Image (cartoon, helix red, strand yellow):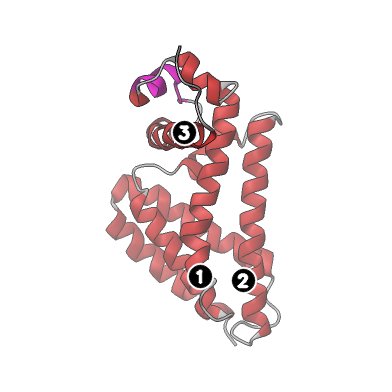
């Protein structure tokens, strides 16, 4: 008889599956995620993978959640160590640039938006919308704090500036894959600098 899987071992296996799913989804997107390829990659049977995730959709949702936490830890955690104001906002953007450099071959979060933006509402689209709304809110909050300390003008519309920053970062992700990260980064940095300068007192 096989020994029972302990909770810690089960959690470790789940993390292993999610890590491999993350790499596969970077190449093929969430919709291209194949349980067969995933099982083969981690040395398990399909039923073994399903034992940790009840369905393919459950796996996709878990992967979105894990990737969102990974992004927040990578981008926001260092930024929150900076003083409130433009310095913190710039750190958010710089860390986002670094995320773009690492993920120039494919970002699960960006591809998820393009995969589900035109679909009918369902668990995956709802999750993507919630993640994106939360991230826009975090950007807008950092912008408001920069306004409060006097680093940005008081007539700034936080949601609009958050949209503009987000649009530039999407441009970075888009161009990095097509024309290389160095050129995309140079253009995006110049655009971000002009954007912030236009909103300073």
Is residue 195 something that shows in the picture? no
Q: The residue tagged with tag 1: helix, strand or loop?
A: helix
Q: Position of residue 59 (x, y in %)?
A: 55, 29
Within 10 Å of the Cα at label 3, are there few (<14), some (14-19), or many (20+) other Cα atoms? few
Within 10 Å of the Cα at label 1, are there few (<14), some (14-19), or many (20+) other Cα atoms? many
Q: Main secondary structure of the magenta part?
A: helix
The disc at residue 9 is 3
Task: Tell me where the magenta segment starts and ends, as one range.
Answer: 32-40
> Which is nearer the eye, 145 or 82?
82
Instruction: Indicate whether 36 appears above or below 80.
Output: above
Q: Position of residue 140 (x, y in %)?
A: 65, 66
In the rendered structure, the answer to whether residue 44 lies left or right of residue 157 reads: left
Which quarter of the image is occupied by the N terminus?
top left
Instruction: Indicate whether 11 appears above or below 69.
Output: above
Query: Residue 125 is drawn in which quadrant?
Result: top right
Instruction: Indicate whether 129 appears above or below 90.
Output: above
In front: label 3 or label 1: 3
Q: Pick whichever of labels 1 and 2 is earlier in the sequence.
A: 1
Number of marks in the image?
Answer: 3
Which quarter of the image is occupied by the C terminus?
bottom right
Distance from disc 3 to disc 1, alpha carbons, whole Å, reads: 33 Å
Q: Pick whichever of labels 3 and 1 is earlier in the sequence.
A: 3
> Which residue in the protein does label 2 denote?
142
Residue 33: within the magenta?
Answer: yes
> Which is nearer the eye, 96 or 187?
96
Q: The residue tagged with tag 2: helix, strand or loop?
A: helix
Q: The residue tagged with tag 3: helix, strand or loop?
A: helix
> Which is nearer the eye, 89 or 81?
81
> Which residue in the protein does label 1 denote?
79
Is the residue under label 2 in contact with that under label 1 (CB below 8 Å)? yes
Is residue 9 something that shows in the picture? yes
């Amino acid at each position: 008889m096989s020994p029972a899987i302990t909770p810690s071992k089960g959690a470790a296996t789940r993390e292993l599956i999610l890590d491999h799913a993350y790499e596969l989804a970077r190449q093929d997107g969430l919709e291209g995620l194949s349980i067969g390829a995933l099982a083969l990659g981690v040395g398990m049977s399909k039923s073994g993978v399903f034992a940790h995730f009840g369905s393919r959709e459950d796996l996709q949702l878990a992967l979105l959640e894990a990737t969102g936490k990974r992004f927040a830890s990578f981008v926001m955690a260092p930024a929150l160590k900076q003083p409130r104001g433009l310095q913190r906002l710039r750190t958010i953007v710089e860390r986002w640039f670094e995320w773009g450099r690492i993920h120039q071959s494919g970002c699960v979060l960006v591809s998820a938006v393009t995969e589900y933006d035109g679909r009918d509402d369902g668990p995956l689209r709802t999750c993507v919308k919630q993640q994106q709304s939360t991230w826009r809110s975090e950007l807008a909050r950092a912008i408001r704090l920069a306004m409060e300390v006097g680093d940005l003008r008081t007539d700034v519309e936080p949601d609009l500036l958050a949209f503009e920053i987000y649009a530039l970062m999407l441009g970075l992700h888009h161009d990095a894959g097509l024309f290389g990260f160095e050129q995309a980064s140079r253009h995006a940095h110049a655009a971000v600098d002009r954007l912030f300068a236009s909103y300073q007192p």
